Amino acid sequence: MAIAARFEVEFTRFLDAEGGATQELPAFALDPANLIPLYRAMQLTRAFDTKAIALQRTGKIGTFASALGQEAIGVGVAGAMRKEDVLVPSYRDHAAQFMRGVTMAESLLYWGGDERGSDFAVPREDFPICVPIGTQVCHAAGVAYAFRLRGEARVAACFLGDGATSKGDFYEAMNFAAVWRAPLLIVINNNQWAISVPREHQTVTPTLAQKAIAAGIEGVQVDGNDVIAVHDAARKAVEKARAGGGPTLIEAISYRLGDHTTADDATRYRDADTVQQQWANEPIRRLRNYLARIGAWDPGKEERLLKECADQVNAAVEAYLAIPPPTTVAMFDHLYATLPAALQDQREAAQWFASHDGGGSHG
Amino acid sequence: MAELNLVEAINRALDWELAHDPSVVVLGEDVGINGGVFRATVGLQDRFGPERVIDTPLAETAIVGTAIGMAAQGLKPVAEIQFSGFIYPAMDHIWNHAGRLRNRTRGRLSCPLVVRSPCGAGIHAPEHHSESPEALFAHLPGVRVVIPSSPSRAYGLLLAAIRDPDPVIFLEPTRLYRLFKQEVTDDGEALPLDVCFTLRAGTDVTLVSWGAMLNETQAAAEALAQEGVMAEVIDVATLKPLDMTTILESVSRTGRCVIVHEATRTGGFGAEIAANLAEHGLYSLLAPVQRVTAWDVVVPLSRLEHQYMPSVERIVAAVRKTLEGA
C-alpha cells in the first residue's frame, strides 16, 4: 500500500484565555496601536448587541441575531480587508460590517424591517446580509471570479456558521473558487451551535477546516476568540488571494454565548453552566488582559472607551428611530429596474388603499 | 441573412453579445470545449476564451449562485442549466437571491443574469429531460420568464434578455432546436420583452400559447381555417411580466379563447391567463375559456410522451367547444 496523499490542519492561537502570549506574536501585533482599534471595534459590537436586544425586547426592532462572544471573528477578518474588497456577510456579521463602514443605524434599520437598511452609504459593493444558510458562499465565489476576470487586485470574503458547512452550497462554492483560483476568503464562525444542534451533530470530522482539503485549498483553524490569531490568518489569506494564490478556508473556533436570535431560547437545549464556563474564553476580556499586561490599557481607558461606544450606539439608535417609515409603494420601486406595465395596476391599488386606510389595515 | 434553426440562432445571439459587450460571460456544464450538449455554445470558447466561456464544475446550485455574484459585480452572466429537469437545486438562488437582490438593496446591487435552460418533451430524451417548469418561475417576483417559439424570436429575445438589467429565466424548447429553419438577420437587433407577438390574425377565436406548443397551435389554426374558423394566434413569449393587454384586446374581438401549454394543468400558467380573462375580459367572452394542457401526470418516458403533450386534435376540439351554440 502506498499513501496517495497526506494532510494536516494547523491550529493557531497567540493569546490564551487569560491574555497571555502562547508564542511570539506576529509583527502587526507587536504595536498596540494596531490592536487597540480591534479592541475598540469588538467593544462597539458588544455595546450594539446589548442595545439591539433591548430594542427588540421593547418592540423597536424585529428579530435580531447577536454576535455575543464572536466579535473577534468579524473584526479580525474585516480589519484585514481593503476598502475595495467585497464582504458577503451572513446574519451574524455586523462586527465585520461595521468595520467595513456599514453604520449601526443602517443595521438597526434592516433589523427594524426596512430594506433601506441594506442600501449602505459606504461599502456600496458589499452584499446585504444573507439569511438562507450558506448560499452566500456561492455569491462570494462569483464576486471573486469577477475580480479575477477583470484582473483586479481585489478579494471577496464571506462568513458562514458551523451549521452551514453541512450545506451543498458551501462545498460547491469552495470547489468552484478552487477550480477558478478565485481571490476568496471563506470564514467559518464555528460557534458550536446551529440554533439547537451542536457542532458534533453536524459532522464527525475533527475540524471544519479540513473540509478545504476536499476542495484542494488551504484550510486553517484558529482560535476565533483570539483576535490576533483571526486577524493574522485573515491577513495571510487576503494577501495570498490578492497575489493570485486562490481561496483559503479559515475555521475560527468560538462560542455562541447568546441565543441564536432574539426569537430563540437556548435554555431549552443547552446547559447554563457550560455557557457560563465559555465566558472564560470570550475575546474581549482576553485582549484587554493582554493590553493591560503590556501596559497599553488601564481602567481609565476602558471607562472612556465604554462611554464612547455607548454614546455612539445611542446616537445610532436616535438616528434609526428618526427615519420615517417607507412609503407603501416602496415595495414596487426596486422590484425591477423599471416597473413593468403589468405591475402598474397593483402599484396603484396598493397606493390607493394605503391612502384610504392609512396603510394600517389588512382588508 | 442566414437560414438558422433555433439552436443556431441562440448561438448567434450569444456570439454577438460576447463580441459586443465585454461584461458578458457564458458559464455552465459542457458549454466550453464541447459547445453544449445541444451545441448552443459551439465555437464560443474558441473565440472568446475559457475565462468568458466557462466550463464549470458539475453543480447547478453553484452555477446560478456564482452567476449571481458575478452579476452583482456588473458582469452579465449567461448561465446554462443543461436541462430544466436539473434546475431545481438552483431554485433557492433564483427565488431567494436573483429575484430579490435589487429590491433588498434598494437598487444598490442588481442581478443582470440570464439562466438559459432547455425545456419540454417530444425528443425521446431520457428521464428528467422533458420538463416544462415555466409556471414555477413565473410565480417569482423580480424575475422575467421568456420562452422563444422560433429561431428569429430566439435570437431577438435572447439578446433582449442578456441586455435586460434584471434576471431572466430563458427556457428553450428542445423540440424546436432543430425543427425548422428561418431567415435570421444576425445584426444584434433585440426584440422587445414583456410583450406578446400576434402570429396570425383571426376573428373567431384567440389561441394563446408559447414555446414549442405554438407548432401545434398554428397547425390547429390552419386546420380550423380550412373549416372557415379564423383563429388568431398569440405567442406570449414573455410569461412574466405578462402582457394581458394584447390578449384582452384580441379576445374583445373574438369572444373566445383557448390557452395551450405543454406543462401540466393544475397551477399551470394557463390558469393565470384564464383568471385574468375572468377578471378583465368576462363580458367579452361568448364561451368559457378552454385550456389545452398536458395531463396532470409525471412526464412519461418516450413511448407515451406524445400522448402526454397536447395534440392538434385536442386544440381543434377545444376550439369547437368554444364554438358550440354559436
Image (cartoon, coloured by chain):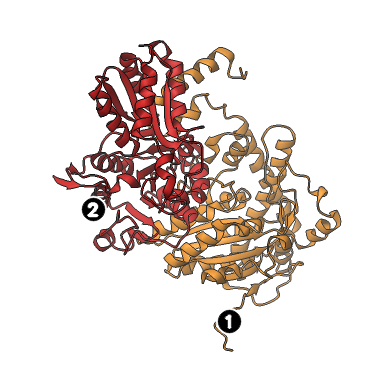
B62 with respect to A94 (left or right): left
- Residue A307 showing in the rendered view: no
Chain letter, colour red: B
Residue farthest toward the left in the current orientation of the protein: B1
Assign the C terminus of chain A to one quadrant of the image: top right
- Kindly identify the amino acid type of the residue bearing the numbered disc 1: Arg
A168 with respect to B188 (left or right): right
Which mark, residue A206? none
Residue B240 screen position, x and y as percent: 41, 33
Please say if A182 is above or below B314: below
B161 with respect to A7 (left or right): left
**Chain at numbered mark 2:** B
Residue B162 screen position, x and y as percent: 32, 44
Question: What residue is shown with label 1?
Answer: A6
Query: Dot 1 surroundings within 10 Å: few (below 14), some, or many (20 or more)?
Result: few
- Residue drawn at x 63%, y 33% is A318
Answer with the quarter of the image where residue A17 lies.
bottom right
Q: Nearer the viewer, residue B161 or B60?
A: B60
Shade representing chain A:
orange
Q: CA distance from mark 2 to mark 1?
A: 45 Å
- Residue drawn at x 62%, y 31% is A321
Question: What residue is shown with label 2?
Answer: B19
Q: Nearer the viewer, residue A113 or A208?
A: A208
- Kindly identify the amino acid type of the residue bearing the numbered disc 2: Ala
Q: Nearer the viewer, residue B320 or A280?
A: B320
- Residue drawn at x 29%, y 61% is B45
Q: Secondary structure at mark 2?
A: helix
Q: Secondary structure at mark 1?
A: loop
**Chain at numbered mark 1:** A
